[in-house]
Structure formats: C-alpha cells, structure tokens
Image (cartoon, grey):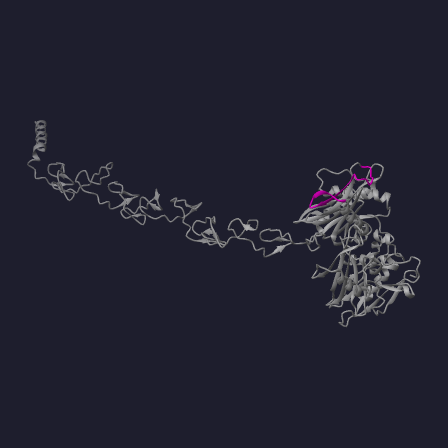
Amino acid sequence: MKKFLMAIGACIAVAFTFVGCAFCNHNYENGTCTICGYDCDHYDYVDTVCTECGTVCTHVYDVEKEEGICLECGYVCEHAEFKDGTCVTCSTVCKHEYENGDCTICDVVCAHPTYENGECTTCDVVCTHPTYENGECTTCDVVCTHPTYENGECTTCDVVCAHPTYENSICTVCNMECQHNEYEESVCTACGYECTHAQYEEGDCVECGYQDFTWVPADGAVSKYENVVDKFNWLAQQYLENGELPAKEENEPVYVDSLYNAITAFNAYKVEEDEEAELGYAYKDINGDGWKEMLILRRDSYVYAIYTFVYRNFEVAYNNDIGYDYSYLCEEDILYRFEKGLDANNKQIGATYSFMKLVGNAFDGFEYGFYDADGDGSDSDDRIYFKTENGEKTETEKAEYTKNSNHTYDYFISYSTISARKVGLIFNPVIGSEDGFEKSVFDLSSYDAIKATYKKMYTEVANKKFDKSAWRDGKYDRGMIFNSAEDYAIYNSLFCSITQHQYSATSTSSTYGYAEKDLDGDGVNELILMDAYGTGSSARKDIFAIFTLDKEGTPVLLDVYSNLRTAAMDATGKIYVAERILFRHAKDFEYSVYEVKDGKLSVVDCYGYYCDTTTSSTQIKWYKKVNGEEVEVEKAEFDGYFANFVGKKTANSSNYGKFTASNANLSYVALFSKNNV
C-alpha cells in the first residue's frame, strides 16, 4: 500500500510539472521558478532585462560576425574596454578613428603600414622621416627636398649636394663656395672659375697647377741639367779608366747620343791636335727666354752639342755629329759653323758656312757654300753655289758666294775663336786636368782691384807672356776664378784686346798701364786701360777699355776695344770708334762718336758706308744713323764727317786705323812692360 501511494505521488508531481506552470504564478530566482522549477525562456527583453523573469541578460555575442549585438537580447555592446584593438566584451575589432596616430576609440597606436606622399594611408599622420638613406626616408620613401644645407650637406637627410650649377663660384643649390678641386687649362671643371694664378711655387700655380713657361729657376735652369752632368761625368770616367766608352743601354734618353758623339770626337781631336785639350760643359741663355742652355764643348769653345728647355721641356737643340771644321758660339750668340768638303784624296770639293741663332728649340739662320758637280775640286764652271734661307736651299751666283766668303774668311774664320772667348761660357771640365795652375781671383770691385787684376792677367795667368793661341785655346781661363759669367766675358774681352794690341814681339818699348780722367764732368774719374808703344814720331797710345763708377761706387765696364773696333779720345773726353760691322762685308765700316753721360756711353753721331762686294773697297752707299736706323746720305756729307772724325779727308784702310789717344791729355801711368815682368 505504501509503495502504491508513493507511485501515485510521483505521477501527480510529474503531471504538475507539465501543466502546473500554466497555472503557477512563478516566483523566479536567477531565471528559475522557485515554485515550479520552471526555467524562463527569456522571450522578451527590455533594456537587457527579461520581461518574464527579470533576469539581466548575460549577453551572448557572435564573435565571427563582430557585430557586437547580443544574440539573446539584442543589446548593442558599448565597447567600454578594448585590448589591442579588440573589445574585451564582444571581441569586436575596433573600426579605429585616429587622431595624431592614436585611435580615439580603442587607443591603439597606428602601425602606419603604408604611406602616400609622406602621410599614413591609415591614420593620415605625417611621417617624421626619422632616418634617410640616399635622400629617401626609410619609413615612407618620401624624397627629401633638402630645405637647408650646411657645408654642402643637407641638414635633413645628410645627402651631399651634387652642385649641379654654379654662379660666381657659388652653388645655386646649397650656396656652398666651390673648392676648385680640379682644373683643366686653368679653368675649374666644376664651376668654370678661371684661376688667377695668385701664387706660384717654382713656376707652378699652387692652386691649379698651371705652369708659367716664362718662369725661370733661380739658377737659370742649371739644376735642370743634373742628369746630363751626371751621365757626362760617368761616361767620361768610363772612358778614362777603360780607354773606351761602354755600350749604350736600351731606351737611353736622347741626349746620351750627343754625349757619346762628343767624347768620341774629342778623343780623336786630343790624339791628333792637342793632347792638353779639355772637354766639359758651360751654361748660357742663348735664345733669350731666360732659361740657360747647356753646351757640351772643349775649353777652346768648340761646340759639340747644345741642350735647351722650351716650355720647361728638355730638348737637344744641336748635335754636332758631322764634325764641323769650326763650330763656335760667337758674339750675339750666333752659332758659326764651317765645314770643308773633301774627296777621298783630301782635296777640297766643297764648303758650307752657317750662321745660326737659337730660336725656341731650333737653330735657324743663313747658310751658303759650294760643291763641285763632278767632284774633281777644280774651279771650272761645274762648281755649284748655293744658299739656304728659311729652311729652303737654292742655287745662287758666284758673286754672292764671293761676297759672303770674303767676309767669312776675313771676319769669322780668323775671328770666330776669338769671338767665342767673349760670350761668357764659363768652362766646367769633365775630361782634362787643371793641375799646376795658380788660381787668381778676377776682381773688378774697385779701380785699384782692376789695375791689380790687369797685371795678374799678364804676369801670373798668362805665364809672363801674351800667347794669343794659348788664350784662344782657353788655357789661361784655368788660372782665374770668376764670380760670374759677366766677369768671365769681361776677362776674355780684355784679353782679346790685349792680344790684338801686341806689336813687335822683340820690342822693348811696349808698356801697359792706365789713365784716369773725368769724361762726363761729374767730378768722378773714369778708368782707361791703355798701352803705349813706340818712341818719337811713332809713339802712340791705344785704349783697351773704359770703366766708370756707378752710384754705389762700383766699377762698371763701358766698353772694350780691339783691332776690329778701334778707339781714340780727344781732349774733351769724346770717344771715337771705327768699327767693322758683324755680318757685313769686311770692308764696310761705321764711325761713331760717343760721350759718357749718366754713367753710360751715349752716341753723339754715327756714319758708315757699304762697299761694292766685287771690288771690296769701293764705297757705294753712305748713311747716317738716326735713332739706330740707317738714313742714306750723300758722300760729301760723309766725307765731311770723316774729316772731322780722324783729321783725314779720305776714309780708307790707311787712315781709319791710325787712331791713338796721344792728343787726349791723358796722364798715362805704366803698370808693367811686356818684356820686364
């Protein structure tokens, strides 16, 4: 019975559960009726509260749709809290609204995934361009506009300005002044600036490297020949030690050939002509460009080779490889050459005379000569005469050849070695000895020093006698020490005059001395070097040279005279000079009157004449020099001048050479006699 009642109770409870809710007034707690146990279905919500049971919806969201709407009550999530851009309540991803790169909704900082024109395409933040590479921002790829530069570098991106254009050497982009780091022909390759060559160092512009070809080293270019001198000395030493020259090496500089030629030719000359001969070198600027040339020559001034610098480049200007009979640098720096043409039997069949001047790096001038067409050396009509001018060789007439050859024989062949002694070539020996020669200083520092030196030239240097040949061979040079090439030239000019004024070798009446006289009225005497020769009616005094004093009291040579340029003086101090003119016919003469004025010789008057080239001595043209230019005059005017000039009516060889200083009222003082030193 008990079991039955329990079963009936259970059935009643079940039935109440299914039908009792319809009749139960439900008392809910947490959505479950506390009376009947019914769980509320939450069919309707108002403000997220179930209208049936009053339960607040716990919100269930569709995460995949990210709509943020509760699936139960339709509540829209307010996204009160975000984490990493996702609502922590509904998992909806924030739609992001940015300000200054921060989302105003979720506070997420924009990652700026992409930029356009320097602005983030996501948040519109402008890139700050924290770093650049090659002028492009490594963040947004914006190219820097280089708003400002400092020292040629952009202060924003550090890019170095390429300086595309300049104005007045200032870059138009960065305002940096061009540094002129590279020049081409003195123009800056960057900005076009033309260098002003404000500062030079040894002839090179320190800024652009331009070479000033007019610049001359302090020593006149002597140091530029060091390699030549070293090679010359080495070859000479090999020759002296071994009796022959070493074989030439490959790729030797061009000047080495002329050194070999010089030593070989000199050796032959030394053996055949003069065993005491010496070979060496000298320096002189002979083309007037300020740079000294180097001459390879014997002590007697015979020239084998000449080197030069043109535009500061070393060149061989002259190589005497054919062995001229004469090859001398003469007065006015003329290279005189003579070559005699001989046949196999040593019979002359030709001759060539050359008068050349160095112009730039090459010798140019005049040449003439003859050769036998059949080579028999006869004077028959088969002899062909020629001349060469401006590099062009043409045939000429015998008369023109005769004119030139007469002049050459009279003037150059007899005078070229004398002339060569006077051009200032201080000899530096390479082969030869100076042993046994006492050295005396050539001193021109005062009148007393000149007098003493004058005597030394005779008594000490010339070994107590004047030997014209020994002097012309240069053997007296070894006994003097010279302070300059100018002193050397003066020495030889004086010696030339001395040797040409010697008279009878057995005469006991020839003396050498001086006189002093104020020739210009300034209260200071000039020094006149002279000789005295003969007695009675034949007595005469000839002038060698005249010195004056400059403002500092230093002697200055005014002029030197010789048998080619004879001088006399009158009582007023005027100087009368009869002169044969270089490169004119041997019988042509000029007659000039000079006066000493302001420390120099000044021309008062000058007349001259030309002779017929065929008759030699017949005068055919007369002239007067005005401001150095020849102005033709009548013979009568010339004769009147000449009569006053020498006290003779006719200008001829018997009259012009009789100038003396006997009537000049000079107080002659003898220093020594040629036979009692």
Q: Residue furthest bottom?
A: 523
Image quadrant assignment for residue 77: top left
- Residue 656 place in picture, x, y as percent: 82, 60
Image quadrant assignment for residue 603: bottom right
105 to the left or right of 632: left
Q: Is residue 211 above or below residue 631?
A: above
- Residue 317 place in picture, x, y as percent: 71, 46
Q: Give the magenta part as a residue range.
A: 375-397
Along the line of sight, which residue is nearer the eye, 348 or 206? 348
Q: Quadrant of the N terminus?
A: top left
Determine the residue positioned at 62% across, 51% down.
Answer: 211
- Residue 161 place in picture, x, y as percent: 47, 49
Image quadrant assignment for residue 197: bottom right
Determine the residue positioned at 28% across, 48% down.
Answer: 104
Determine the residue positioned at 7% across, 34% down.
Answer: 20
187 to the left or right of 106: right
Q: Quadrant of the C terminus?
A: bottom right
How many labels sit on residues?
0
Is residue 476 something that shows in the picture? yes
Is residue 428 something that shows in the picture? no
- Residue 219 place in picture, x, y as percent: 71, 55
Along the line of sight, which residue is nearer the eye, 489 or 478? 489
Is residue 393 within the magenta segment?
A: yes
